Image: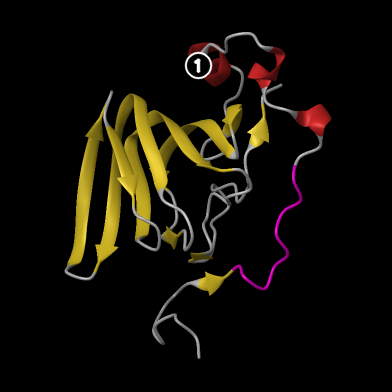
Amino acid sequence: MSSEPANSAFTSASAAPAPAPAPASASPASASGLPVSLADALASFDDLWSPRIVTAVNDYDVRVAKVEGEHVWHAHDHTDEFFLVLDGELTIELREAGGERAVVLPRGSVFTVPRGTEHRPVAPGGAAILMFEPTGTLTVGDRHEEVPDHVDATTGHRLA
């Protein structure tokens, strides 16, 4: 029996094979043992909702992204999702047992979305964010609505 509600607009990613680990040659920028400037990392790309992996900590990626507008409603069934707002303002809309709520994160704020919680990041005025997630975690989670063209469904891209 499925654990998803019958009226859920989400599709399950469980039928898809898990992404393969990145080859050693594609290690994060900080694997060289040198510091990574978050400002330089953010300046190296323009794509929205398309995170870049700036380093790894054990089995976790540290990703930065430029965001504007709405992401997609999604849930990560097996992991929490950590957000740090580097610039701008990010709102995380949440669907919880008690109903929907929005958490507003100004610059410098952090928030962790608990595993299994449906959520949608929104940034009407744009923002730069840092996320901390297990390596291989899809940006659209394990369950999600249809992914619009402006959202990159990825496990993160390496810095150039």
Residue 70 screen position, x and y as percent: 39, 48
Inspect this view and state whether residue 47 appears: no
Q: Is residue 66 above or below residue 43?
A: below
State left or right for residue 103 relative to residue 19: left
Specify the amino acid type for callout 1.
Answer: Leu
Whether residue 127 appears in magenta in the rendering, the answer is: no
Residue 66, compared with residue 72, is above or below; it is above
Relative horizontal placement of residue 74, taking residue 51 as reference (left or right):
left
Q: Nearer the viewer, residue 40 or 1?
A: 1
Residue 28: image location, x then y, percent: 67, 26
At 25% from the left and 35% from the top, the residue drawn is 105
Residue that lies at the very extreme toward the left in this rendered image: 98
Tell whether position 17 is magenta.
Answer: yes
Q: Residues within 10 Å of mark 1 (few under 14, many from 20)?
A: some
Q: Nearer the viewer, residue 106 or 114?
A: 114
Q: Which residue is mark 1?
A: 38
Asked if residue 136 lies left or right of residue 62, the reply is: right
Q: Secondary structure at mark 1?
A: helix
Q: Which residues are magenta?
A: 13-21
**Which quadrant: the C terminus?**
top right
